[in-house]
């Protein structure tokens, strides 16, 4: 009788364990990294498509790490966005001349939007990056693990040239010395999760290397071109 009572007491606990083990397990870091504040460098003339309180507009078609069509790429660190803007978003891409802008964005993964994260610059990451740069855009977007994703996060690539054609490794920040990561929105439904919080205009400077944004300063609002 005591044995039967013991079994009856244990059964509910076993039932809970069985039910719990049948539930899918989602990595916590994936959920945590799919929200937050990011930064995007633009040319001043692109401010019309990056207005505060609105979703950013779709950028022009240009192959990138995570899409051979178009991508809205964002840094998790502001200082790297400033460096990128000073180097590549000034008039005629001439560092040290004119102005550029840095957009501060709030990102939250919309319900139903497919999100993928590369945790490291592994073989799968390199193969996907290579496909995006090597595949003709008219042939369509290369698929990742057999699927299409609207938002992709992972290492930023650096092209390595060797005698056998080279490949890709992870880009290192010229400011912090740390490996660079990025969040890329590569489909329109993904842009619905991005909201512009602020836009700052900077006067460009002759700043080629870190550790600080030497000479780069916020432009007075009245001086913005």
Image: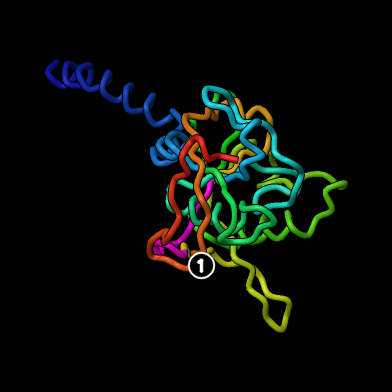
Task: Kindly indicate the quadrant of the structure image that contains residue 194.
Answer: top right
Q: Main secondary structure of the magenta part?
A: loop
Which residue is outermost to the bottom?
A: 163
**Whether residue 223 is visible:** yes
Give x and y (percent) for residue 14: 30, 25
Which residue is outermost to the front?
A: 222
Magenta-tinted stretch = 174-182
Task: Kindly indicate the quadrant of the structure image that contains residue 135.
Answer: bottom right
Residue named by callout 1: 208
Look at the image and say whether residue 93 sits in the magenta stretch. Answer: no
Colour convention: rainbow
Q: Nearer the viewer, residue 146 or 209?
A: 209
Vertical arrangement, residue 32 with respect to residue 9, above or below: below
Look at the image and say whether residue 175 sits in the magenta stretch. Answer: yes
Q: Nearer the viewer, residue 30 or 18?
A: 30
Vertical arrangement, residue 2 with respect to residue 205, above or below: above
Q: Is 155 left, or right, of 137 in this rendering?
A: left
Give x and y (percent) for residue 17: 32, 28
Task: Kindly indicate the quadrant of the structure image that contains residue 147.
Answer: top right
């Amino acid at each position: 009788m005591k044995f039967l009572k013991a079994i009856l007491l244990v059964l509910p606990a076993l039932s809970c364990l069985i039910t719990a083990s049948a539930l899918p397990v989602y990595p916590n870091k994936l959920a945590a990294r799919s929200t937050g504040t990011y930064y995007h460098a633009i040319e001043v003339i692109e401010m019309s498509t990056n207005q505060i309180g609105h979703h950013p507009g779709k950028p022009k078609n240009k192959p990138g790490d995570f899409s051979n069509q178009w991508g809205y790429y964002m840094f998790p660190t502001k200082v790297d966005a400033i460096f990128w803007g000073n180097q590549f978003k000034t008039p005629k891409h001439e560092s040290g001349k004119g102005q550029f802008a840095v957009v501060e964005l709030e990102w939250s993964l919309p319900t139903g939007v497919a999100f993928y994260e590369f945790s490291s610059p592994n073989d799968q990451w390199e193969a996907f990056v290579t496909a995006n740069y090597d595949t003709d855009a008219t042939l369509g977007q290369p698929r990742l693990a057999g699927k299409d994703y609207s938002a992709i996060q992972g290492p930023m690539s650096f092209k390595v040239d060797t005698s056998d054609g080279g490949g890709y490794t992870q880009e290192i920040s010229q400011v912090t010395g740390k490996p660079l990561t990025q969040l890329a929105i590569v489909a329109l439904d993904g842009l619905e999760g991005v909201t512009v919080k602020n836009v700052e205009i900077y006067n460009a400077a002759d700043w080629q290397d870190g550790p600080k944004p030497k000479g780069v300063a916020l432009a007075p609002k009245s001086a913005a071109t």
